[in-house]
Amino acid sequence: MIQKSESIPVALARKSIAYYLQNRKKLPLPDDLPPELIEQQAGVFVSLKKGERLRGCIGTFLPNKDNIALEIIENAISSAIHDPRFSPVTLDEVGSLSISVDVLSAPEEIKNNSQLNPKKYGVIVSCGYKKGLLLPDLEGVDTIEQQIDIARQKAGIYADEDFKIERFEIKRYH
């Protein structure tokens, strides 16, 4: 089920989804993972596509688990079965999904929009308890204004409300 050219984080995500769908429990942490996945913490997003169509995308902008590997396992399963926009992924689909894993840097507050670039930085907009996140380098998101507007709408923040903007970078694995 693992694709030949997949990165280790993507292979871990795919294996996690298949294991969960077969056993209804989370994949135990494999012993053969590289140190950066075991020794570091970060927010992680797992995106699933079937062809060009999004099939699931769930993640955390701050780490919730003890390491990146556990974050990948948790978010891969959530993307496959808990994204409310889609029906749960089936075991038959797992091999045909294209998966990307984005490991996020720590968010940093920005002073003005000139510090943004939608191809390089993702954004988090927040107003009180409302938060919206948009990953960088997304097809069809070409301007800073589009990026902020989409993230703001995801958060349910109105255009006339004051909101804080943070940026982050990602390391994207395919």
Image (tube, rainbow, N blue to C red):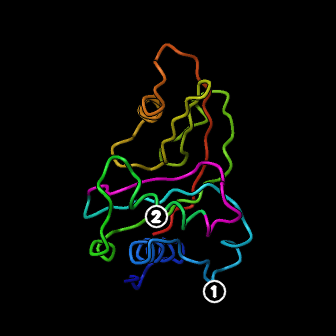
Quarter of the image for the C terminus: give it: bottom left
What residue is drawn where x is 39% and y is 77%?
A: 22
Going by the image, does 43 lie left or right of 27? right
What residue is drawn where x is 46% and y is 58%?
A: 78
Percent coordinates x, y for residue 32 in the rendering:
63, 86
Residue farthest front in this picture: 24
Identify the image quadrant of residue 128: top right
Q: Is residue 67 magenta?
A: yes
- Which residue matches tag 1? 32
- Mark 2 Cα shell of 10 Å, populated few (<14), some (14-19), many (≥20): many
Residue extent of the magenta highlight: 53-70
Nearer-the-camera pick, 83 or 146: 83
Residue 76 image label = none
What residue is drawn where x is 60% and y is 28%?
A: 129
SS at circle 1: loop
Amino acid on which the number 2 mark rests in the picture: Ile
- Which residue matches tag 2? 77
Going by the image, does 90 lie left or right of 43? left
